């Protein structure tokens, strides 16, 4: 711990020079009521909030007549609500990095963390903005206090690609903790028009505890604690009700639910993947990860199911959150014995005081031909990903998928 204090003191001495040097390169803009930095090239524009490091809006295909903005931005951004229940709710939008992931209601290891950790609700500092060849990178940093450490966020875009590459490097923060990305997508208008597909899974489970509490004017539609193997056949909460199909959204108006799927065994260097096909809009959003680091995906399903403040029955989004965690229960539940660890599923990662841990992640968009429908499979070639639909349609996009396993973005 003495080493961590010395290390943080050194960073504190360096921080004023680093931040002032970088600040001149990237001006701060107010976007959807939040002070943000913007990283952009001809293909992609990425806004990142100072508070919490939330990534949205992101505009893909920005140089075309029909740009794509797939991420959700919470509907209360212009309301200046004075006291929200958690800091993460202030900028709530798009994708953000969570450490420790989850609600963190209970104290653990003598620590009390805010929901989704300081990384999701505290201010980040601008470290640098660089351009090297076709690659542009925005680097932010935050020093955590509830458990001493430093997290560096690197967001990169590459000319000619509709992809955002992120790398979160964790230094210090020693010990076990749940960790994850909280990608949150906007819902399309037509019911069932967004189709979800994933790489192979071992099994899925609905949140074992009550996720939406009617006493707080929240309502859920799925059976708590159910275990299943097919996203299209998830038990409903009511006796004799048909199974819910979690491959089609929006669905089940008036409810908010949470489920977790566990990825199948990793196959060599092939990433695990999640896709959302927006058929009416003509594109697929996708996320790629190393399943040995982030071993699960949580579905946060919000379809006007919460009626307390600030939700007020308005929130309509789908979180596709790649994590190693026990649902959204936070540090205490994730580092202890739980239903998933009993199945041999890790729900926390071990962080080292002496060796940084990197969490690499890819998100992007690819336009699809008419009739593409839902993704069936992804295939990988050097620097390329081919998406095949259940209807046999195919589209290939430049994606440096090797990045999730430590590959470089430079040629």
Image (spheres, grey):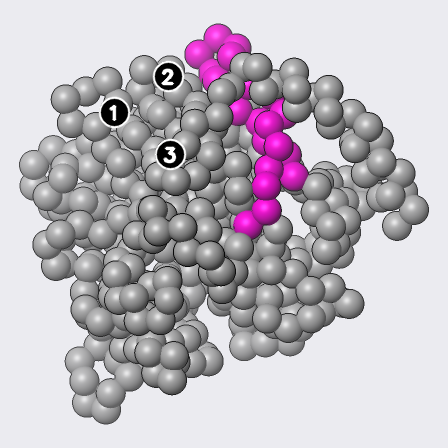
- Residue under the point 24% across and 18% down: 63
Which mark is drawn over residue 41? 2
Which mark is drawn over residue 23? none
Where's residue 178, x and y in %? Answer: 60, 58
Residue that label 1 marks: 61
Residue farthest to the bottom, as pictured: 239
Say what secondary structure mark 1 lies in: loop
Is 42 positioned to the left or the right of 339 in the image?
Answer: left
Is 99 positioned to the left or the right of 238 in the image?
Answer: right
- Distance from label 1 to label 2 (Cα)? 10 Å
Where's residue 1, x and y in %? Answer: 88, 50
In front of the other: 210 or 92:
92
Q: Residues within 10 Å of mark 1 (few under 14, many from 20)?
A: many
- Residue under the point 30% across and 30% down: 59
Q: In the rendered structure, which segment of residues is drawn in magenta?
A: 121-142
Residue farthest to the left, as pictured: 370
Q: Is residue 138 magenta?
A: yes
């Amino acid at each position: 711990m003495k080493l961590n204090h010395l290390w943080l003191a050194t960073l504190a001495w360096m921080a004023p020079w680093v931040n002032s040097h970088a600040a001149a390169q990237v001006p701060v803009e107010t976007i959807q009521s939040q002070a943000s930095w913007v990283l952009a090239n001809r293909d992609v524009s990425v806004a990142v909030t100072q508070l919490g490091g939330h990534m949205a809006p992101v505009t893909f295909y920005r140089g075309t007549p029909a740009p794509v903005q797939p991420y959700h931005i919470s509907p209360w951004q212009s309301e200046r609500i004075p006291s929200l229940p958690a800091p993460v709710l202030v900028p709530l939008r798009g994708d953000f990095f969570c450490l420790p992931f989850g609600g963190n209601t209970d104290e653990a290891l003598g620590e009390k963390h805010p929901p989704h950790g300081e990384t999701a609700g505290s201010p980040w500092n601008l470290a640098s903005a660089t351009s090297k060849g076709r690659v542009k990178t925005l680097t932010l940093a935050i020093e955590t206090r509830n458990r001493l450490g430093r997290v560096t966020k690197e967001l990169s875009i590459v000319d000619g690609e509709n992809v955002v590459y992120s790398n979160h490097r964790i230094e210090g923060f020693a010990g076990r903790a749940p960790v994850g990305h909280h990608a949150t997508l906007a819902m399309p208008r037509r019911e069932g028009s967004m189709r979800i597909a994933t790489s192979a899974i071992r099994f899925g489970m609905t949140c074992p505890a009550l996720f939406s509490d009617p006493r707080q004017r929240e309502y859920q539609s799925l059976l708590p604690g159910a275990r299943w193997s097919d996203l299209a056949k998830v038990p409903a909460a009511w006796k004799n009700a048909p199974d819910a199909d979690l491959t089609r959204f929006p669905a089940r108006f008036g409810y908010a639910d949470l489920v977790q799927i566990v990825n199948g065994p990793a196959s060599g260097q092939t990433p695990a993947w999640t896709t959302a096909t927006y058929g009416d809009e003509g594109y697929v959003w996708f996320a790629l990860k190393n399943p040995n680091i982030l071993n699960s995906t949580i579905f946060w399903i919000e379809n006007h199911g919460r009626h307390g403040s600030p939700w007020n029955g308005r929130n309509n989004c789908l979180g596709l959150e790649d994590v190693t965690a026990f649902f959204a229960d936070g540090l205490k539940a994730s580092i202890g014995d739980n239903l998933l660890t009993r199945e041999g599923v890790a729900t926390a990662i071990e962080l080292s005081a002496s060796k940084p841990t990197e969490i690499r992640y890819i998100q992007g968009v690819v336009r699809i031909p008419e009739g593409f429908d839902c993704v069936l499979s992804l295939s990988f070639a050097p620097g390329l990903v081919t998406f095949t639909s259940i209807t046999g349609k195919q589209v290939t996009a430049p994606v440096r998928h090797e990045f999730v396993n430590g590959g470089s973005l430079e040629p």
